[in-house]
Amino acid sequence: MTAERVSVRVRDGRQIVTDTGHHYGGQVLTVPARLAREWQRYGWAEPVEPTAAAEDGDQAAAPGADAEPPDTGQAEGDPGDPGDQEGPSAPQGRANVRARIAEELAADPSRSDRVIAKTVGADHKTVGSVRRERLDADQPTDPGA
């Protein structure tokens, strides 16, 4: 029994790493439907309507399939600022990871720090830090203090 496969496009500004390599924003991949749904739920990819050629069984080149990785302005092998290269989401930058954590917290604040950390690809302590910052920002200041 073969699992259904669907086409998805990696969202701009995202990077997905699979056993076949790194896939950057704009690339179209054909993956099992279950994996595609998971990527879409996390906001990493969006569905792509099959083309007429693909429906006929032809392997048409997907738009963006040969996309080059984004130019970071660094020479290959140059580690750059080590502070910007922590954790699985390092290519997206720390600010973007914190923004993704804030989005996940806004969507469902009842989820644990560890669940959100796994979803975003960050450390659970970072999620806790962002959660505390949001709570502190929501607390009114006492004018009599």
Image (cartoon, helix red, strand yellow):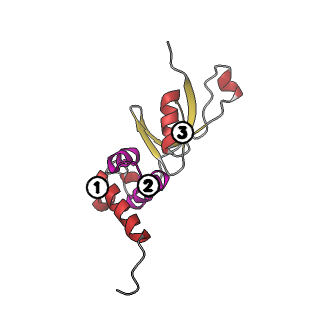
Residue under pointer 2: 105
Q: Secondary structure at mark 1?
A: helix
Amino acid tagged 3? Asp
Task: Judge left or right: residue 57 versus residue 40.
Answer: right
Q: Contact (CB < 8 A) between labels 2 and 1? A: no
Residue 99 located within the stretch drawn in magenta = yes
Give whichever of discs 2 and 3 has the lower sequence position: 3
Where residue 72 appears, as percent x and y from the top left, is 43, 57
Q: In this picture, is 5 found above or below 16?
A: above
Position of 52 relative to 122 (above/below): above
- The magenta span reads 92-121
**At x 53% / y 40%, what residue is drawn?**
40
Disc 2 to disc 1, how far (Cα)? 14 Å
Q: Residues within 10 Å of mark 3 (few under 14, many from 20)?
A: few
Which three-letter amino acid code belongs to the residue tagged 2? Leu
Question: Residue 11 or 53: which is nearer the viewer?
Answer: 11
Mark closer to the observer (2, 1)? 2
Q: Name the residue located 55 percent from the left edge and 22 percent from the top edge.
A: 4
Closest to the observer, 138 or 1:
138
- In terms of sequence position, does the residue under pointer 2 or pointer 1 come before the other? 2
| Foreground tag (2 vs 3) | 2
Q: CA distance from mark 2 to mark 3?
A: 35 Å
Residue bearing the label numbered 3:
66
Residue 58, percent across and down?
64, 22
Q: Is residue 130 magenta?
A: no
Secondary structure found at label 3: loop
**Placement of 120 over or under 133, stated as above or below:** above
